[in-house]
Amino acid sequence: MASCRACDLRVLTAVVCGLLTIIVLGLGIWTTVLNSQRELSTSSPSIPLEFCRNGGTWEYGGCICPDLWKGWRCTITNFCEKSTYESLTFDRIPVGKYGSSQQRCDKDTLNAGNPIATRLCSITIYGEIELQNVTIGNCNETLETLEKQIVNISTQSLNISAEAQILTSDVNRITPEGIISATRVVGQIFNSTRNAVPEAKVIAVTTVSQLLDAGEDVFRKAAATASDKDDTLATLIKQMEIYSTSLGNTSVVKPNVAVQSVAFSSESTMESLNVRFSVRKGTSDSLVPGFTAVERDVDKLNPDGETELQILLSTSKSNNTTACGFVVYQNNKLFQSKSFKAKSDFSQKVISSSTDKNNLQGTSVDIVFKPRYDQKEFQLHSYACVYWNQTTKDWDTDGCDKNGSTNDFLYCHCNHTTNFAVLMSFKKKYKYPESLNIISSVGCALSITGLALTIVFQIVTRNVRKTSVTWVLVCLCTSMLIFNLLFVFGIENSNKNLKKSESSTGKPDSGRNEMLMQDTVDIGNPTCTVVAALLHYFLLVTFTWTGLSAAQLYFLLIRTMRPLPQHFILFVSLIGWGVPAVVVVVTVGIIFSQSGSQWELNYRQEEICWLAVSGNSGLISSPLLWSFMIPITIILINNIVIFIIIIVKVIWKTNQNLTSTKNVSFLKKILSTLSITVVFGVTWILAYFMLIGNDDVRIIFNYMFCLFNTTQGLQIFILYTVKTKVFQSKASKVLKLLSQSTGRVRLLPSVAPLRLRVRMYNTLRSFPALRERFRLLEPSVIVEETTFSESDQADSSM
């Protein structure tokens, strides 16, 4: 009956431990995913979110409103309400944009899935919002078929332009081939030799604005497929420059493109012709009519707090210039650079300045840009004043110079006219952690000492131990010792000190105007990368040896495999030291092949010398997940399963022949359980609880994790060295010698009774009358000595 109850208790214990393990690992993975999603979606505005209404965000000292709203707090409507026209239905349409009908072309048409019609929401000169007439498209017309009708532009320009606008209204459906076809059609509409009507060109500006909402990857692929002889993007850019000089003194402003023309009067008596064109900041990211301005006969730039972009064109009247034009692009997607690589999503405006006379002498431009970027996370490092070289199809610095900078503006000067931009490079503002706290420092110091003593003890006393068990424990302690040393002396990034020594002015580099290669600058630190790789390797080695230790105890205690298989030490050594090396090398190789020379920060963090938490696609592609968390999770699950089996079937198994007292038996079981827990690394499951979103709960588990795992080496030293009879015997001898050297001989309590009995026995044996009476003392001494020796052997095998 008692055995059945004991069996039920063991089964219940195993089930409970298994369920707890599954729950802990499940919660860990679940909270990891939630935290990664929360980090991507959560922002920390400097003022309460309730200030900016209707989805507005606080940036650059004001609310940036979505397209449907405007005003200081995004509370003023900036859209046309839902409308219907015959059988067509339209949702809310932002002012200045075309809205697509909810009805789509049937699946059996060439234009299946695209909207049937579009409708413009405009604003009158009196500020009233009104809907324009509906434009119905042809569902059997595609951008590819429209491209073939270019020859008919002279007679059907309005119809072709309207069709192109409808076909590009849904930017999510635009393909690289569609970009090429659309830019070819629109480029020919702007071509003055095609004689397209002015209304068609205005609609074409809308089409270009819609195209600029397409994804960066779509434009990159379109530019890659374009040939040098038929580069539709370059053709469109050139034709828009020419178009900008033909509008007299009018402008065309769309959400992503603004075109402004200025006509010079022949009656002007001034020798130099100066025109200043400004773009002011609105309440949204879109360009808005009324937020551009032209000023004549000015001699310098004059930006204010509302200025986003300003350009001063200076030319001579002797050049017989009759008009000039400006084109502002909200982003640089039409300008696909081969040399400059952008990783951030900061929009970089491009402005074109041109005259109706090409290659004019004495014509120059001065430009001021107000950079827009996340100033909480990034710091402007440097910038380059560039222009778009039509020959090389890339940005170039020839003829352009930096003209200084302030906290808000970047100034440039160029001695020619074309498309200009400011390429900027940023340094991320990393939050370097403080030095290790007192718990981690003391715990690691104790662990390092304990591990070093354990290794020395295991090697010195190897003759009285089983080689295989000693080797596994020595390898585990060695890898853990090296990891702790690297952690204490190498986990902090030395760039932390560079950050403190940098100037706090925050002004970008205003020296030589040199071409930039990318928009983010990272200070390389190969030493930190090497430390991260070594930490990665030795922590994997540590976990691998815990798994091998668990497997070895399973074969020894459960399968009772004695002796162990031949070449066992060689086999486990190859696994323990070799498999983690393969994992680290493969991880570094894959990241290097995908990232090239910028691979370091895709492998490690900048804040500390450890694996990167998120990759190019977030946590799911991070090296921390695939090359660390998943392997150690598998090892931990294996260790916990073996731990439960050993606890139930060996340590806490009921023994009817047990002769020791219950208190001593229970204490031994507790110590044996703790010994296996430490070697198996079971306490590392606390790391999963550190991913909990609640700060108070997470802090508790942080301290528990630091307490149990930074002192893991000390725990091994106490349980596998101090508790052994061999260590206690050696320690007693050392203490005896120390006591004798100081003249204070003090026998240890555990050794004194035995030696006193031996001395008494030897003295009494010298008397024949008493020899027979004390004869029974001899077996007790022998039994005690034998027990002492066997106990040493048992402790050494564990």
Image (cartoon, helix red, strand yellow):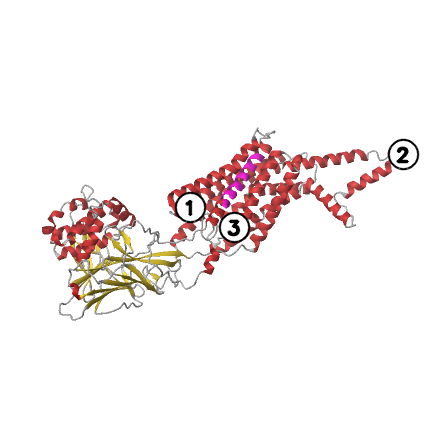
Foreground mark, 3 or 2, reads 3
Q: Viewed as shown, does residue 373 lie left or right of 727?
A: left
Q: Give coordinates of residue 296: x percent, y percent.
A: 20, 68
Q: Amino acid at mark 3?
A: Gly
Which of the numbered marks, if any, corresponds to residue 768?
2
Density class for disc 1 (Cα within 10 Å; few <14, some 14-19, many ≥20) is many
Q: Viewed as shown, does residue 543 lie left or right of 379?
A: right
Q: Give coordinates of residue 138: x percent, y percent.
A: 15, 47
Give the residues in magenta. Answer: 534-553
Density class for disc 3 (Cα within 10 Å; few <14, some 14-19, many ≥20) is many
Which of the numbered marks, if any, corresponds to residue 490?
3
Which of the numbered marks, if any, corresponds to residue 622?
1
Q: Which secondary structure is most common in the magenta stretch?
A: helix
| Residue 664 location, quadrant | top right
Q: Identify the secondary structure beneath mark 3.
A: helix
Q: Give coordinates of residue 442: x percent, y percent.
A: 59, 53
| Residue 398 location, quadrant | bottom left
Foreground mark, 1 or 2, reads 1
Residue closest to the eye, 667 or 169: 169
Instruction: Check residue 773 for magenta coloring.
Output: no
User: Tags 3 and 1 in contact by the CB under 8 Å rule?
Assistant: no
Residue closest to the eye, 108 or 149: 149
